[in-house]
Image (cartoon, helix red, strand yellow):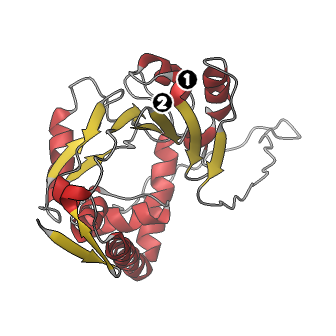
Amino acid sequence: MPRRHHGGVTTNNDALPQPPLVEMVFLGTASMVSSPTRHVAGIGVVIGGDCWIFDAGEGTGTQLAKSSVLQSAVSRVFVTHMHGDHVFGLMGLLLSVGSTGDPRIIQVDIVVPSSSMFTFAHQHSCRLSVHLDFDVHECTNAFVESLDGGGHTSSEQVEAATYVHGHSTPRTAGRFAQAIQCRHLILTHFSRRYKDDGSMEPVMDTIRRQCGALYDAGKIECAHDLEAVTVKIPKEDRYTDTDQAYKDAATAADEAKAHAQAFFHAHESLLLQLSRRSRRLLE
């Protein structure tokens, strides 16, 4: 029988108990705000009949009711960070699951503490205190230089600008998945502009290609709302070196962060202009 040695303990794979069935249900795959075809962040992980919810954006309770997950199975909720699209649906979710099954305590964990800065801006009108006529001098020779190099934005610019806002890109996800030799990478948390009605499939293909440029260890998929994925654990992988996997993941994350930081510092002025321009387009 094959035997493995991990951390001073010799194990026999055939003697290991059958791991419980693990199923992931994507309750919401959008970021920032919901759209008619995508709800904001929420993932249910069902292990042996027990369900843990990761993030609870607005409407997560409603999505849970539409899914294959029993509301009475929810026992814990994990909030990865305190952005609104990850936490605004928490109270509704707790009310939904708390009204099903036997009375029970549902544990809520804040995984990563978050610091927030609030800006209080006073808005003032621009009305003149004295109503007088005045001349308007039009600047006919004014122009704005292209902020993205004549319509082209490099992948490094995108990755660095995204890092500024604390998010990842398909390339970042691919680099991370390759480092830990992930067998099945499922991308989620898409911008509201990416509809989940089939019309954006060419865009999803582009996202998969960008990710695949740095990841070739397994399958790449773009998640859909209410999609359920069964996580299969092969017999040979029931007992693996998790310490090394954590180290590889941390190294990959640090490398991605350093790469984005270096590009940002080298092109700080341009990236800040791009950031301000993006905000104006969303207003």
Q: Nearer the viewer, residue 215 or 99?
A: 99
Q: Quadrant of residue 237?
A: bottom left
Question: Which residue occupies the extreme right position in the image?
Answer: 129
- Type of the residue with mark 1: Ser
- Type of the residue with mark 2: Ser
Q: Quadrant of residue 200?
A: top left
Residue 175 circle label: none
Q: Quadrant of residue 156?
A: bottom left
Please state, as top left, top right, bottom left or bottom right, where the C terminus lies in the image.
top right
Please state, as top left, top right, bottom left or bottom right, where the N terminus lies in the image.
bottom left
Image: 102 above or below 23: above
Can you see residue 59?
no
C-alpha gap between disc 2 and disc 1: 25 Å
Residue 187 image offset from top left, x and y in percent: 30, 47
Q: Which residue is mark 1?
A: 72
Looking at the image, residue 264 sits to the left or right of residue 227; the answer is: right
Q: Nearer the viewer, residue 82 or 91?
A: 91
Specify which label sits upstream in the sequence, 2 or 1.
2
**Structural crowding at the residue carrying mark 2, measured as other residues with C-alpha within 10 Å and reported as few (<14), some (14–19) or many (≥20):** some
Image depth: mark 2 or mark 1 in front: 1
Can you see residue 118?
yes
Q: Nearer the viewer, residue 275 or 52?
A: 52
Residue 34 circle label: 2
Residue 98 image offset from top left, x and y in percent: 66, 24
Residue 66 image offset from top left, x and y in percent: 43, 17
